[in-house]
Amino acid sequence: MALQAKHIKQKISAVGNIKKITKTMEMVAASKMRRAVEASLASRAYAVSALEILVHLAEEARAENIFTQERTTPGAHLMVIVASNKGLAGGYNINVSKKVTEYCKDNRDVDIHAVCIGKQAEKIARRNNLTVVASFTEFKDFGHLEDAQAIMGLVMDLYERDETYQKIHIAYTQFIKALTYAPKVKPLIPVQAESLYMMITDEASPDTLHAAESRALYLFEPSEEEVLATIVPQLLRAVMYQVLLDAYAAEHSSRMLAMQNATENAGELQKELTISYNKARQAAITQEIAEISAGANALM
């Protein structure tokens, strides 16, 4: 009995140490989440305004752009997968993986390549037997504009240079509000205003995007083609930046919730072990009293 009580006491101490670690990780994740959410909300207004400008320009312009034209010839699909570098984030990476698997099943006859952002994204691509074209695993915990420019620059270059790609999608986790986020797979190229608007705001594009009274009369200089060639890539970089910010906010939110649950579970386990320890200790004391009483009776 004494050995059992000692073993339980060691377990209580170990669970207590784990509880301290998960509580610390929860506080760190909460701090990072607040910072990531502030960045995401601050960038969202710019992304929406940039999209509105593109819609108005596209309606006024008569020219086409390589990133707005649909390719009718069947070809490979390119998927940008955004996941985390680290684990211990609850179902964050698993949910992205499920969305990628669903997309692959729906397009089982298509050759799908992947651009991976995060170490977990590369694992997701390998599990689904995707051809990994590029992998970014050295990004910080918070999105930087330079990161978005590097990723989008590569993606646009692949689409522009390799005409075998018919379309490009992005798999990521959209941040809606604190503790609320949803994995998504959305079309990225060719550019579709409705889809991009939903990526930024998680709601259908309002009529104001297409309202005639909201459009200004545009004068294109030096030409419509050159204006679109400048505006469209800038918009795509803004959207990618917003996607990264949303993904990081969702990741830290998911990690905070996972660590909170782990801390609560550790507390419950501590209580159960304490009850077991008290029972074992009480049983040991009862046994000792019984042995003493038996010895005393033997001497009488």
Image: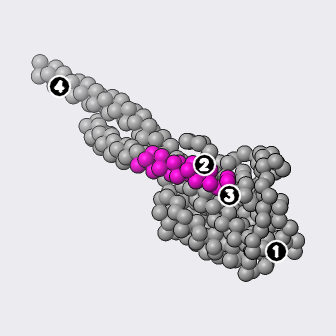
Question: According to the image, label 2 marks what residue?
Answer: 175
x%, y% of residue 278?
A: 31, 29
**Left or right: 278, with 179 as reference point:** left
Residue at (58% x, 66% y) in the render: 148
Check residue 75 in the rendering and tell me which mark sits there, or answer none: 1
Whether 272 is drawn above or below 152: the answer is above
| Few, some or many residues within 10 Å of mark 1 (<14, 14–19, 20+) | some
Q: Secondary structure at mark 2?
A: strand
**Residue sitting farthest toward the right:** 72
Earlier sequence position, callout 4 versus callout 1: 1
x%, y% of residue 282?
A: 28, 27
Mark 1 vs mark 3, CA separation in Å: 30 Å
Question: According to the image, label 3 marks what residue?
Answer: 50
Reply yes or no: does residue 74 show up in magenta: no
The quadrant the C terminus occupies is top left
**Left or right: 83, with 291 as reference point:** right
Whether 196 is drawn above or below 299: the answer is below
Q: Which residues are magenta?
A: 28-49
Mark 3 vs mark 4, CA separation in Å: 85 Å
Of tags 4 and 1, the one toward the viewer is 1
Residue at (60% x, 48% y) in the render: 175
Would residue 276 be visible to someone looking at this image? no
Earlier sequence position, callout 1 versus callout 3: 3
Q: Amino acid at mark 2?
A: Phe
Question: According to the image, label 4 marks what residue?
Answer: 292
| Few, some or many residues within 10 Å of mark 3 (<14, 14–19, 20+) | some
Mark 2 vs mark 1, CA separation in Å: 31 Å
**Residue sitting farthest toward the bottom:** 161
Residue at (80% x, 58% y) in the render: 217
Mark 2 vs mark 4, CA separation in Å: 66 Å
Mark 4 vs mark 1, CA separation in Å: 86 Å
Q: Secondary structure at mark 1?
A: loop
